[in-house]
Each structure stands twice: as C-alpha cells, then as structure tokens.
Amino acid sequence: MGKLKAWAKNLKRKIFILYYAYKDKRVPWYAKTFTAGVVAYAFSPIDLIPDFIPILGYLDDVIIVPVGIMLALKMIPINVIADCEMKAEEMMKKGKPKNWVTGLLILIIWSLFILWLIIKGYQIVKGQ
C-alpha cells in the first residue's frame, strides 16, 4: 500500500508541475494546449468515465491521466520543468484547484449522450 500511496503523490506532484508549465512562455503552443487539457482533466471534479462504472471508471485515473502526464512532460523543455518543480511543491501544501469549467463540459457531454440514448430508445419503441 505504501508504494501505491507514493505513486499517487508523485503523480499529483507532476500534475502541479504541468499546471505551472502550461503557463510558462517558454513552452511551445502545442505543448501548452496538450498540457492544459491534461491539467484541466486532472483537476476536474467530474470524470469523463464515472468511477461507479466497474473497471472502466478507474481507467482514466490509472491509465489515461498518467499517460497524458508522461506525454506532456516529454513536450516541455527540461529547464521549464525544473523551474516549475519548486512552485509545484508549494502548491501541493495548499491543495489542488478545482476546474469547474472542465467539469461542466464533461457534464454537458454526458447529458447529450443520455439525451441521445433517450431519443434513440423512443424511436425504437415508436417504430415497433
């Protein structure tokens, strides 16, 4: 259990590093765009795949977010990452910010999906 806790803390630290890195002027625009998406998703209070869905619900936490972090870190210059590490340590003491905009976007996506399912279900029932 100790290794899992250390892994999670390291992952959180990297998210905070990315949070500061995407604001840095030395980071290329494509890296900023990708990094902003990773950070927004990680800080979102709502997951794209809700955790209550068996197995799939934890895929974003265990696979999608870590892979996104790894790819984003590869796009950012090493000197920027080094500069952002100290800022990240300070932020970790304060707690993570919530990204309600991304949470709202995910909520809208799910609402549209559910609406589509209802319409399709109605069309199937009406057609019979």
Image (tube, grey):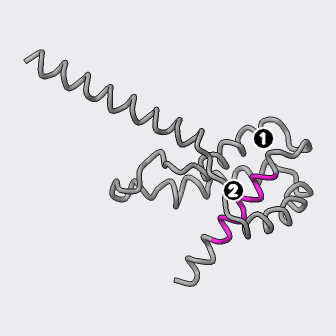
* Mark closer to the observer (1, 2): 1
Residue type (three-letter) at the residue carrying disc 2: Met
Identify the residue at image location x=72%, y=62%.
Answer: 14
Residue type (three-letter) at the residue carrying disc 1: Lys
Q: Quadrant of the C terminus?
A: top left
Question: Does the magenta portion include 15?
Answer: yes
Name the residue beneath numbered marker 2: 70
Q: Is residue 82 left or right of residue 93?
A: right
Q: Which quadrant would residue 94 be assigned to in this image? A: bottom right
Identify the residue at image location x=57%, y=49%.
Answer: 44
Question: Does the magenta portion include 35?
Answer: no
From the viewer's perspective, is residue 57 above or below residue 33? below
Disc 2 element: helix
Q: Is residue 39 left or right of residue 55?
A: right
**Distance from label 1 to label 2 (Cα)?**
14 Å
Q: Which quadrant would residue 90 be assigned to in this image? A: bottom right
Q: Which quadrant would residue 95 be assigned to in this image? A: bottom right
| Residue farthest toward the bottom in the current orientation of the protein | 2
Name the residue beneath numbered marker 1: 32
- Report the disc number at residue 67: none
Identify the residue at image location x=59%, y=47%.
Answer: 41
Tell me if mark 1 has few (under 14), some (14-19) or many (20+) residues whose alpha carbon lies within 10 angstroms of its own.
many
Which stretch did the figure color magenta? 9-20
The image shows residue 3 at horizontal and vertical percentages of 58, 81
The image shows residue 117 at horizontal and vertical percentages of 28, 29
